[in-house]
Image (tube, helix red, strand yellow):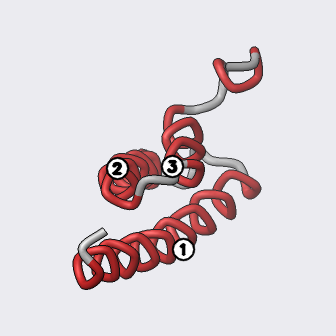
Amino acid sequence: MSDNEAHAPQWKRLYKTAIFELDPAKSIQRIAEARSSVLDRIEEGFSKASEGEAFALGYALHMLTALRHIAEREIGEQKKTGA
């Protein structure tokens, strides 16, 4: 982990972990953790967040939702094929 990553907010670290996870089963859990952390940050109040962070939080939620759908589809395909 680089020095910049060590100082990144928790939601960003969890988000990066989720987007780089290759195993669909593990991805579902990592996405849930990242989504929870993003929502916690949002609940802290956008008044504390810069405009850039507010945009990044919204984008992260959008991407995590898309990734969850992809992971769920991959898990479904694996079940069908028995892989």
| Image marks 1 and 2: residues in contact by CB distance under 8 Å | no
Q: Which mark is residue 21?
A: 3
Tell me residue 56's x, y (percent).
67, 58
48 vs 7, left or right, is left
60 vs 35, left or right, is right
Q: Is residue 43 shown to the viewer in this render?
A: no
* Element at label 3: loop
Amino acid type shown at disc 2: Lys
**How many neighbours does mark 1 have within 10 angstroms: few (below 14), some (14-19), or many (20 or more)?**
few
Tell me residue 51's x, y (percent).
73, 57
Q: Which residue is mark 2?
A: 26
Depth check, front residue: 66 or 53: 66
Check the image and report above or below for 18 versus 70. Answer: above
Q: Which residue is mark 1?
A: 62
| Image marks 3 and 2: residues in contact by CB distance under 8 Å | yes
- Name the residue: 56% across, 36% down: 13
Amino acid type shown at disc 1: His
Tell me residue 82's x, y (percent).
24, 74
Tell me residue 49's x, y (percent).
62, 47
- Name the residue: 42% across, 49% down: 34
Amino acid type shown at disc 3: Glu
Closest to the camera, between mark 1 and mark 2, is 2
